[in-house]
Amino acid sequence: MINETVNQENRKVAVSVDNVSKVYKLYDRNRDRMREALGLTRKKLHKEHFALRDVNVKIYQGETVGIIGTNGSGKSTILKIITGVLNPTFGEVRVNGRISALLELGAGFNMEYSGMENIYLNGTMMGFSKEEIEKRIPDILEFADIGDFVHQPCKTYSSGMFVRLAFAVAINIDPEILIVDEALSVGDVFFQSKCYHKFEEFKKAGKTILFVSHDLSSVAKYCDRVVLLDKGVKLGEGSPKAMIDDYKRVLVGQYEMNSQKADAALAPGENPELLEYGTGQAKITEYFIEDDHGKNTTAVIKGTEFSIHMKVEFMVDLPAPIFAFSFKNIKGTEITGTNTMFEKSYLKPVKKGQVLEIVFTQDMSLQGGDYLLSLGLTGYEGDQFQVYHRLYDVLNITVISEKNTVGFYDMGSKIEVINVNNSSEDE
């Protein structure tokens, strides 16, 4: 293991991925593989597939770093290289610290062994003595909470039971670096909550977490930094919000588009660096918020009615455009939103040159604080999903509240206290 120090910041590097590529040889026929391996031909019979291409990432101790991307982007490949399951074709990976990895269901477990036997097996593989493993067993069993099934063969477990045990082992062997790859998606909501609470404990303890997930809300909430991969190439790294916005552009094939907004005078609360993209077949030309008195505003009082307005111009005929809005908190977690398809409203064709104003009216139930409003104009042409125009984080909306409750929004509870034994408080 190598200790590395970051210039100026004096933070140690936990994982360093330097110019890493992973290349697989693809053959049309199995016999071509054999012929090439035995040197029976001078002709190249394979095609090269780069699962990763010249990827560079540094992860510092104490960070929680997310890796996001579409299927086939190289997320699992880079984790397997970091943990030593795969070797890179080119480049170098250096790790400073004890790694515990939960890469996929079943990795590192013998399905014929009981859960208890697998605890000892995994602990031994990590270099612990029998006595050290036994000290950790009570914490593992408490976290896994699978009861007497721990003494049964793992092949009899449900997927939920299995991941509970696997995750309990991974986090209770005192790792310095925890690597998790989508494993939590099979656990129930209560177990997932317990795991994310453990993430918080790890962060406070200065542990390093490398986290791959398609759950963008969890990525935004728990990660300090995010790396975006696509087809084996690192497109960028930065704040969760920025990378998630870029990922959404990748999903609709518009990452390369210029998202610069035309110079214009900005209204109060408007974002000068909003993310904007689309096919250009229709355009959101105007947007604003009205309060319950019909006045334009970017501050809404909790508990009052307000409306979101957007004006749309159509450059071509479209079969059935979908109009949408969503609210995110300042960390980038999507809190709420809807669209005209969900609401079963105005699913009609439109003509070139037509201009529509769409008004969403609702009560403000969000807790007091600052939120970011995004607007969308999409649709389906046959089976093909199209993004005509999207504006992310166009307005900063401030919710003014005299009373906040727990969580993102207020359920509007009404409280009644009933004296069931009819006794007087004065007695």
Image (cartoon, rainbow, N blue to C red):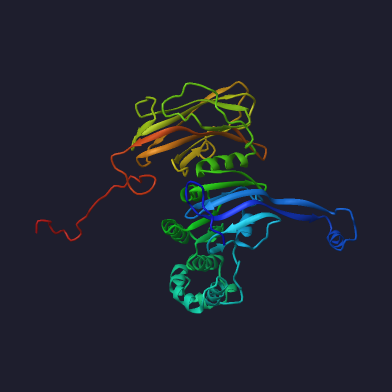
* Residue drawn at (23%, 53%) of the image: 417
Comparing 111 with 128, the one in front is 128
Q: Say how many tags the image has.
A: 0
Above or below residue 386? Residue 73 is: below
Residue 4, how many percent across, how many down?
54, 55
Residue at the far left in the pictured view? 427
Q: Percent from the top left, x then y, of residue 88?
A: 68, 57
Residue 206 visible (yes or no): yes
- Residue 41 horizontal side relative to residue 348, left or right: right
- In this rendering, position of residue 404 left or right of residue 421: right
Report the quarter where the C terminus lies.
Answer: bottom left
Residue 73 drawn at (x, y percent): 65, 49
Q: Camera-side residue: 295 or 350?
A: 295
Task: Give whichever of 374, 180 is nearer the camera.
Answer: 180
Q: Quadrant of residue 290?
A: top left
Question: Taking the image as drawn, is residue 214 in sight?
Answer: no
Quarter of the image containing the N terminus? bottom right
Whether residue 181 is situated above or below residue 263 in the rendered picture: below
**Residue at image x 37%, y 29%?**
291
